[in-house]
Image: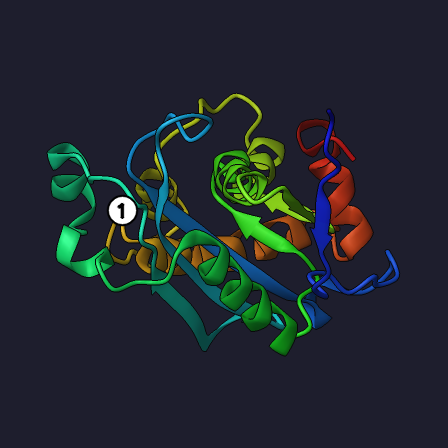
Amino acid sequence: MFWKKKSLHYQLNNELPLNTPLKELSFTVFDTETTGFAVGSRDRMIEIGAVQVQGLEVTDHTFQTYVNPEREIPDSIQTLTGIKPSDVEGAPLALEAIESFYQFIEQYDSGGWVGHYLDFDIMVLKKELARHKLTFDEPTYIDTLDVIGYLNPSWDMRDLSHYAIQFGSKLFERHSALGDARTTAHLLVELLYHIGDRGKLTLGDLIEITKKDNGY
C-alpha cells in the first residue's frame, strides 16, 4: 500500500515580488553535518547550523543544534567535524531538530535558503523527514556555487574555503555546521556585491542567474 507524505507547514519562504531589491532581502544560510555521505541509506544528520543575512549584511541571528543520529559516528567523521558521541547523546532527534530550525527561519521572514553545495543539505533534510513520512513546502533555493558559476563560468567546483579566500570573505571553523554557515553567509554577501556590479540587483535577477542549476 502506498503512503502519502504529509507536509510540515512552516513559513519557510516569503513570496516576494521578483523586483524586490537584493539589499532588502533576508536569507537563511545553513549547513548540515552527517555521519557520512550515504544519507539515503545508513548515514544520518548530526548537526544543523544557520545564520541570517539581512540587507547585504551577516547578522548575529544564528541557530545551532547537534542531532542524535541514533547510530555511531565513524572515527573519520569525528576527526573531520570534531563532533563526538557525547555531543549528540542528549541532543534532539532529527525531526525535533528540523522543526526547531524551521521555527528559527519563521522568526526572521526569510526570503529563501542559501548554502554551498546546497543539494546535499536539502537531501539530508528530505531523507530525515521521509523517515517520518513527512515533507515540507519548499522555499527558494540559492546555491553559492551557482552564483560563482555565473561570475566565473570556467571555474571548477572547489571547497568552500577556497572561494572564501578567492573572494576575500571571512573564514570560520570548517566542517562545523554553524562555522560553515557563517563562512557561506559572508561569501554570499561578497557574491551579491559582485553580481550587483554587473547590474543584477533584484531577487528575479538572482533567480535567473542560478536558474539552470537550481531547476526553477
Q: In which quarter of the image is the C terminus?
A: top right
Q: How many marks?
A: 1
Place residue 76 in its image quadrant.
top left
Q: Quadrant of the N terminus?
A: top right
- Residue sitting nearer the eye, 74 or 151: 74
- Residue sitting nearer the eye, 90 or 27: 90
- Residue sitting nearer the eye, 159 or 127: 127
The residue under the point 15% across, 51% down is 85
Residue designated by label 1:
175
The residue under the point 63% across, 46% down is 142
The residue under the point 42% across, 25% down is 41
- Residue count near mark 1 (Cα–Cα under 10 Å), binned few <14, some 14–19, many ≥20: some
The correct choice, above or below, for 55 with respect to 35 in the image is below
Residue at the farthest front position: 1
Name the amino acid type tagged 1: His
Q: Quick check: 108 left or right of 16?
A: left
Q: Quick check: 124 left or right of 74?
A: right
Place residue 37 in its image quadrant.
top left
Q: Quick check: 22 left or right of 85?
A: right
Tell me residue 209's x, y (percent).
72, 38
